[in-house]
Image: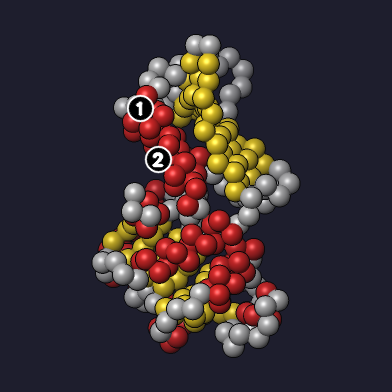
């Protein structure tokens, strides 16, 4: 059994990930962390029934991981919290699956350093949906065949999302830019803004949109659109649990979801 902990356990993603863990025959929930409902049984807090696992304070993550024999920690929180969670979890010897986005360069450096120093394995990805990872592969192929086309990226998410643009949109821009030999990014436009060779990135926030990403390649007299739409957070939760199984079999290092999928 893979002893698994979840941070942000009482949130929407945390709740769904816990449900996926409970449905997995070779996983068990060993610990749960959240800034709310501390001390309460996590199953009762999220409405799944008593699980015998209390909600712990994230400040105690290192101690709790060691005391519970946790082998892998799944984190879908916010960057400022996740950066600390990852370092503490790595210091405690736990493997990691991280779907949080919006990290600064310094936060990323600190996380990677802790992962290396402690010899653990981590899957860190801006998106764990299988379809999104295929979406990125399609963008590589399209960009290689459409040199000279203008590129614009539009992403839409719910009105509670903190970071913009989304990590998935940024990854899409990186994938395309690498194929094209490097492109500047422009985040929205205002005033006089003549178009050059840049990749335009536009963020839309509203309602309960789970996640929509569209990349448009504009040529003379034609355009191609490559789109991915997430209809449910299950796409992310299922991918995260799949990554948790995979990371347990890997050597120390930082991996992406493409590695999990064998891409």
Q: State the image quarter where residue 137 is shown.
A: top left
* x and y, in percent, of residue 52 in the image: 59, 88
Question: In the shown orientation, is residue 169 left or right of residue 35?
Answer: left
- Judging by the rendered image, the residue that carries numbered circle 2 is 137
The residue lying furthest to the top in this view is: 220
Nearer the observer, 117 or 134: 134
Residue at 51 percent of width and 25 percent of height? 224
Pick whichever of labels 2 and 1 is earlier in the sequence. Answer: 2
* x and y, in percent, of residue 63 in the image: 44, 82
Nearer the observer, 34 or 147: 147
Residue at 45 percent of width and 78 percent of height? 26
- Judging by the rendered image, the residue that carries numbered circle 1 is 144
The residue lying furthest to the front in this view is: 25
Residue at 55 percent of width and 56 percent of height? 235
* x and y, in percent, of residue 229 in the image: 59, 44
- SS of the residue at dot 1? helix
* x and y, in percent, of residue 123 in the image: 38, 60
- SS of the residue at dot 2? helix
């Amino acid at each position: 059994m893979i002893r698994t902990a979840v941070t942000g356990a009482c949130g929407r993603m945390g709740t769904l990930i816990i449900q996926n863990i409970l449905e997995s025959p070779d996983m068990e929930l060993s610990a749960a962390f959240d800034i709310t409902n501390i001390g309460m049984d996590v199953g009762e807090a999220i409405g799944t029934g008593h699980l015998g696992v209390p909600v712990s304070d994230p400040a105690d993550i290192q101690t709790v991981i060691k005391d519970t024999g946790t082998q892998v920690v799944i984190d879908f929180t916010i960057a400022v919290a996740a950066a600390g969670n990852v370092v503490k979890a790595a210091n405690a010897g736990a493997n990691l699956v991280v779907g949080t986005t919006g990290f600064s360069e310094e936060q990323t450096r600190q996380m990677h350093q802790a992962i290396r120093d402690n010899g653990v394995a981590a899957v860190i990805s801006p998106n764990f949906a299988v379809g999104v990872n295929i979406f990125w592969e399609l963008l590589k192929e399209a960009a290689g065949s459409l040199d000279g086309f203008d590129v614009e990226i539009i992403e839409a998410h719910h009105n509670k999302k903190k970071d913009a643009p989304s990590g998935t949109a940024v990854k899409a821009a990186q994938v395309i830019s690498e194929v094209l030999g490097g492109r500047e990014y422009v985040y929205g436009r205002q005033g006089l803004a003549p178009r050059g060779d840049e990749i335009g990135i536009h963020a839309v926030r509203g309602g309960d949109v789970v996640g929509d990403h569209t990349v448009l390649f504009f040529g003379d007299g034609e355009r191609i659109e490559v789109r991915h739409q997430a209809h449910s957070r299950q796409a992310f939760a299922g991918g995260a649990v799949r990554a948790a199984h995979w990371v347990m079999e890997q050597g120390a290092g930082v991996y992406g979801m493409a590695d999990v999928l064998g891409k």
